Image: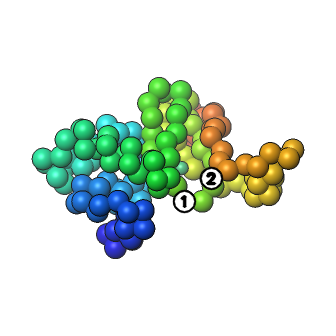
Amino acid sequence: MKKVQNILNENNIKPTFERLSILQYLESGTNHPTAGMIYEAMRKKIPTISKTTVYNTLKILKSHDIIHSISVPDGETHYDVNTQVHYHFYCTECHKIYNLELDCPQLENKLIEGHKINNFHGYFTGICKKCLKKNNN
Ligand SMILES: [Zn+2]
Ligand SMILES: [Zn+2]
């Protein structure tokens, strides 16, 4: 909890219990949850939490660049904690989003053809290793 409290303090966001819990949840996993998934997970912990609180918290965190959103072909917005630049892989069979650690020297340079790169929004698609294994059996 200390880490997420610091993040909120540094960004001058009032550290309410709901906000701390939502950020903690996002920090603790790599499952790229949707707002609905976050709401369901939070409800187990804070039964009084409303969907509006979840949406508003995500909006605040996003506006401070603490989290970012990923759009994938399932039409839902997924959320990710903004740590280091990483890439996403979307499995078209199980609809899971995986993190990919890739070396991209051009991005590390932050200049491509003279353009200054601040961020990357995009994803790879295909069939994940779990689904490949299932298909082979
Ligand atoms: Zn899969
Ligand atoms: Zn990610």
Any part of residue 124 in sight = yes
- In the image, 84: left or right of 94? right
Q: Is mark 2 within 8 Å of ligand 2?
A: yes
Question: Horizontally, is 117 left or right of 6 in the view?
Answer: right
- The answer to whether the beta carbon of the residue marked 1 is less than 8 Å from any atom of ligand 2 is no
* Whether label 1 touches label 2, CB < 8 Å: yes
Q: Is residue 40 above or below residue 84?
A: above
Q: Amino acid at mark 1?
A: Thr
Amino acid on which the number 2 mark rests in the picture: His
Residue 132 occupies quadrant: top right
- Write down the residue under mark 1: 83
| Residue 13 spot, x, y in % from top left | 35, 59
Furthest-right residue in view? Answer: 113
Q: Quadrant of the N terminus?
A: bottom left
Is residue 129 left or right of 44 when viewed as pictured?
right
Q: Which circle marks residue 86 in the picture?
A: 2
Label 2 CA crowd tier, 10 Å (few <14, some 14–19, many 20+): some
Residue 134 visible in image: no
Q: Residues within 10 Å of mark 1 (few under 14, many from 20)?
A: few
